[in-house]
Amino acid sequence: MNRWSELTGETSGEDYAARFAALARSGKDVHGEARFCAALVPAGARVLDAGCGTGRVAIRLAELGYDCVGVDLDASMLAVARKQAPGLPWFQADLAGFEPDLLGIAADFDLVVAAGNIFPLLAAGTEATVVQRLAAALRPGGLMVAGFGLDEAHLPVPPGITLSEYDDCCAAAGLTLVDRFATWDAAPYDGGGYAVSVHRR
Protein backbone atom coordinates (compact mmCIF):
# COMPACT_ATOMS: atom_id res chain seq x y z
CA MET A 1 0.00 0.00 0.00
CA ASN A 2 1.28 3.50 -0.77
CA ARG A 3 1.82 6.05 1.96
CA TRP A 4 -1.05 8.20 0.67
CA SER A 5 -3.54 5.34 1.17
CA GLU A 6 -2.17 4.67 4.65
CA LEU A 7 -2.50 8.36 5.49
CA THR A 8 -6.01 8.99 4.14
CA GLY A 9 -7.73 5.66 3.65
CA GLU A 10 -8.48 7.05 0.16
CA THR A 11 -11.63 8.78 1.38
CA SER A 12 -10.43 12.38 1.60
CA GLY A 13 -11.32 13.80 -1.81
CA GLU A 14 -14.10 16.14 -0.66
CA ASP A 15 -12.09 17.35 2.38
CA TYR A 16 -9.03 17.99 0.24
CA ALA A 17 -11.04 19.97 -2.32
CA ALA A 18 -12.76 21.97 0.44
CA ARG A 19 -9.41 22.92 1.94
CA PHE A 20 -8.16 24.35 -1.35
CA ALA A 21 -11.48 26.10 -2.01
CA ALA A 22 -11.16 27.80 1.39
CA LEU A 23 -7.59 28.86 0.59
CA ALA A 24 -8.73 30.31 -2.74
CA ARG A 25 -11.57 32.21 -1.04
CA SER A 26 -9.12 33.66 1.47
CA GLY A 27 -7.20 35.19 -1.43
CA LYS A 28 -4.35 32.68 -1.46
CA ASP A 29 -2.97 31.81 -4.87
CA VAL A 30 -3.66 28.09 -5.43
CA HIS A 31 -2.47 27.97 -9.04
CA GLY A 32 1.31 28.23 -8.64
CA GLU A 33 1.89 24.77 -10.12
CA ALA A 34 -0.22 25.47 -13.21
CA ARG A 35 1.48 28.82 -13.76
CA PHE A 36 4.90 27.16 -13.43
CA CYS A 37 3.92 24.52 -16.01
CA ALA A 38 2.50 27.12 -18.38
CA ALA A 39 5.87 28.88 -18.39
CA LEU A 40 7.57 25.67 -19.56
CA VAL A 41 5.40 24.59 -22.51
CA PRO A 42 3.14 26.56 -24.88
CA ALA A 43 -0.67 26.45 -24.74
CA GLY A 44 -1.98 23.47 -26.64
CA ALA A 45 0.77 21.20 -25.29
CA ARG A 46 -0.22 17.75 -23.96
CA VAL A 47 0.10 17.56 -20.18
CA LEU A 48 -0.16 14.51 -17.93
CA ASP A 49 -1.09 15.38 -14.34
CA ALA A 50 0.36 12.35 -12.55
CA GLY A 51 -1.22 11.86 -9.16
CA CYS A 52 -3.77 14.52 -10.14
CA GLY A 53 -5.85 14.26 -6.97
CA THR A 54 -8.95 16.44 -7.29
CA GLY A 55 -7.65 17.82 -10.57
CA ARG A 56 -6.75 21.31 -9.40
CA VAL A 57 -3.64 21.61 -11.61
CA ALA A 58 -5.04 19.87 -14.70
CA ILE A 59 -8.29 21.83 -14.59
CA ARG A 60 -6.46 25.15 -14.39
CA LEU A 61 -4.12 24.19 -17.24
CA ALA A 62 -7.09 23.10 -19.34
CA GLU A 63 -8.64 26.53 -18.74
CA LEU A 64 -5.39 28.02 -20.05
CA GLY A 65 -5.64 26.01 -23.26
CA TYR A 66 -3.64 22.87 -22.48
CA ASP A 67 -4.59 19.34 -23.52
CA CYS A 68 -4.69 17.63 -20.11
CA VAL A 69 -5.06 14.09 -18.82
CA GLY A 70 -5.29 13.27 -15.11
CA VAL A 71 -4.29 9.99 -13.46
CA ASP A 72 -4.67 9.06 -9.80
CA LEU A 73 -5.12 5.97 -7.66
CA ASP A 74 -7.56 7.55 -5.17
CA ALA A 75 -11.17 7.13 -6.32
CA SER A 76 -12.43 9.73 -3.82
CA MET A 77 -10.11 12.35 -5.35
CA LEU A 78 -11.05 11.42 -8.91
CA ALA A 79 -14.75 11.64 -8.06
CA VAL A 80 -14.21 15.31 -7.18
CA ALA A 81 -12.15 15.91 -10.34
CA ARG A 82 -14.84 14.34 -12.54
CA LYS A 83 -17.54 16.43 -10.87
CA GLN A 84 -15.56 19.66 -11.32
CA ALA A 85 -14.46 18.99 -14.91
CA PRO A 86 -16.53 16.20 -16.48
CA GLY A 87 -15.15 17.04 -19.91
CA LEU A 88 -11.55 16.15 -19.06
CA PRO A 89 -10.15 12.62 -19.23
CA TRP A 90 -9.56 11.21 -15.74
CA PHE A 91 -8.12 7.74 -15.20
CA GLN A 92 -7.78 5.63 -12.08
CA ALA A 93 -4.39 3.92 -12.13
CA ASP A 94 -1.45 3.16 -9.90
CA LEU A 95 1.52 5.16 -11.22
CA ALA A 96 3.79 2.18 -10.56
CA GLY A 97 1.78 0.23 -13.13
CA PHE A 98 0.87 3.14 -15.41
CA GLU A 99 0.72 2.12 -19.05
CA PRO A 100 -0.85 4.78 -21.26
CA ASP A 101 -1.51 2.32 -24.11
CA LEU A 102 -3.70 0.13 -21.90
CA LEU A 103 -5.80 3.18 -21.03
CA GLY A 104 -6.04 4.26 -24.66
CA ILE A 105 -3.78 7.28 -24.12
CA ALA A 106 -0.98 8.21 -26.53
CA ALA A 107 2.40 8.23 -24.76
CA ASP A 108 3.62 11.48 -26.30
CA PHE A 109 3.15 14.06 -23.56
CA ASP A 110 5.02 17.36 -23.78
CA LEU A 111 4.96 17.65 -19.99
CA VAL A 112 4.38 15.34 -17.05
CA VAL A 113 3.72 17.12 -13.77
CA ALA A 114 3.83 15.42 -10.36
CA ALA A 115 2.77 18.07 -7.86
CA GLY A 116 1.63 17.58 -4.28
CA ASN A 117 4.31 15.34 -2.77
CA ILE A 118 3.64 12.45 -5.16
CA PHE A 119 7.06 10.84 -4.78
CA PRO A 120 7.30 10.84 -0.96
CA LEU A 121 3.78 9.36 -0.81
CA LEU A 122 4.47 6.39 -3.12
CA ALA A 123 4.81 2.87 -1.78
CA ALA A 124 8.41 2.52 -0.60
CA GLY A 125 10.60 1.00 -3.27
CA THR A 126 8.40 1.96 -6.24
CA GLU A 127 9.94 5.39 -6.87
CA ALA A 128 12.31 4.27 -9.66
CA THR A 129 9.51 2.33 -11.38
CA VAL A 130 7.18 5.34 -11.27
CA VAL A 131 9.86 7.63 -12.73
CA GLN A 132 10.44 5.05 -15.47
CA ARG A 133 6.71 4.84 -16.27
CA LEU A 134 6.28 8.62 -16.37
CA ALA A 135 9.43 9.16 -18.44
CA ALA A 136 8.14 6.61 -20.94
CA ALA A 137 4.96 8.67 -21.35
CA LEU A 138 6.97 11.68 -22.55
CA ARG A 139 7.78 12.45 -26.14
CA PRO A 140 11.53 12.87 -26.85
CA GLY A 141 12.45 16.32 -25.53
CA GLY A 142 9.44 16.35 -23.20
CA LEU A 143 9.72 17.63 -19.62
CA MET A 144 8.94 16.08 -16.27
CA VAL A 145 8.31 18.38 -13.31
CA ALA A 146 8.06 17.13 -9.74
CA GLY A 147 7.71 19.18 -6.58
CA PHE A 148 7.96 17.50 -3.20
CA GLY A 149 9.03 17.95 0.40
CA LEU A 150 12.35 16.63 1.62
CA ASP A 151 11.96 16.95 5.38
CA GLU A 152 9.35 16.51 8.14
CA ALA A 153 8.37 20.17 8.00
CA HIS A 154 7.24 19.86 4.38
CA LEU A 155 5.62 16.42 4.50
CA PRO A 156 2.67 14.66 6.18
CA VAL A 157 4.80 11.48 6.38
CA PRO A 158 8.48 10.78 7.18
CA PRO A 159 10.68 11.71 4.18
CA GLY A 160 10.70 8.90 1.64
CA ILE A 161 13.15 9.97 -1.04
CA THR A 162 16.14 12.32 -1.18
CA LEU A 163 16.89 14.63 -4.10
CA SER A 164 19.97 12.67 -5.08
CA GLU A 165 17.92 9.43 -5.06
CA TYR A 166 15.29 11.10 -7.21
CA ASP A 167 17.95 12.37 -9.64
CA ASP A 168 19.39 8.85 -9.82
CA CYS A 169 15.93 7.47 -10.67
CA CYS A 170 15.58 10.13 -13.37
CA ALA A 171 19.02 9.41 -14.84
CA ALA A 172 18.24 5.68 -14.95
CA ALA A 173 15.04 6.52 -16.87
CA GLY A 174 16.95 8.59 -19.42
CA LEU A 175 16.04 12.00 -18.00
CA THR A 176 18.45 14.93 -17.57
CA LEU A 177 18.14 17.62 -14.90
CA VAL A 178 17.37 20.99 -16.51
CA ASP A 179 16.56 23.17 -13.50
CA ARG A 180 15.64 23.08 -9.83
CA PHE A 181 13.69 25.58 -7.73
CA ALA A 182 12.67 25.97 -4.10
CA THR A 183 9.02 26.81 -4.88
CA TRP A 184 6.44 26.69 -7.67
CA ASP A 185 7.06 30.44 -7.96
CA ALA A 186 10.52 29.51 -9.27
CA ALA A 187 12.52 30.85 -6.32
CA PRO A 188 16.13 29.57 -6.62
CA TYR A 189 16.79 26.28 -4.84
CA ASP A 190 18.94 26.85 -1.76
CA GLY A 191 19.19 23.37 -0.30
CA GLY A 192 15.95 23.78 1.70
CA GLY A 193 13.23 21.28 2.55
CA TYR A 194 11.19 21.57 -0.65
CA ALA A 195 12.31 21.29 -4.26
CA VAL A 196 10.70 21.57 -7.69
CA SER A 197 12.81 19.66 -10.23
CA VAL A 198 12.59 19.90 -14.02
CA HIS A 199 14.03 17.01 -16.05
CA ARG A 200 14.07 16.53 -19.83
CA ARG A 201 13.77 13.31 -21.75
Image (tube, rainbow, N blue to C red):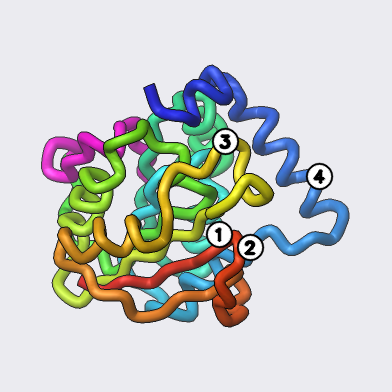
Disc 2, SS: loop
Q: Position of residue 189 (x, y in %)?
A: 55, 76
1 w.r.t. 69: above or below: above
Q: Badges 2 and 4: C-beta atoms under 8 Å apart? A: no
Q: Badges 3 and 1: C-beta atoms under 8 Å apart? A: no
Q: Looking at the image, is mark 3 or mark 1 earlier in the sequence? A: 1
Q: Badges 1 and 2: C-beta atoms under 8 Å apart? A: yes
Residue for badge 1: 60
Q: Position of residue 35 (x, y in %)?
A: 56, 72
142 w.r.t. 123: above or below: below
**Residue drawn at 50 percent across, 40 percent down:** 53
Disc 4, SS: helix
Residue for badge 2: 31
Drawn side of residue 81 relative to residue 91, left or right: right
Q: Residues within 10 Å of mark 3 (few under 14, many from 20)?
A: some
Residue for badge 3: 157
Q: Amino acid at mark 3?
A: Val
Residue for badge 4: 22
**Residue 95 counted in the magenta span:** yes
Q: Residues within 10 Å of mark 4 (few under 14, many from 20)?
A: few
**Residue drawn at 54 percent across, 18 percent down:** 9
Q: Nearer the viewer, residue 40 or 68?
A: 40
Q: Amino acid at mark 2?
A: His
Q: Position of residue 62 (x, y in %)?
A: 47, 60
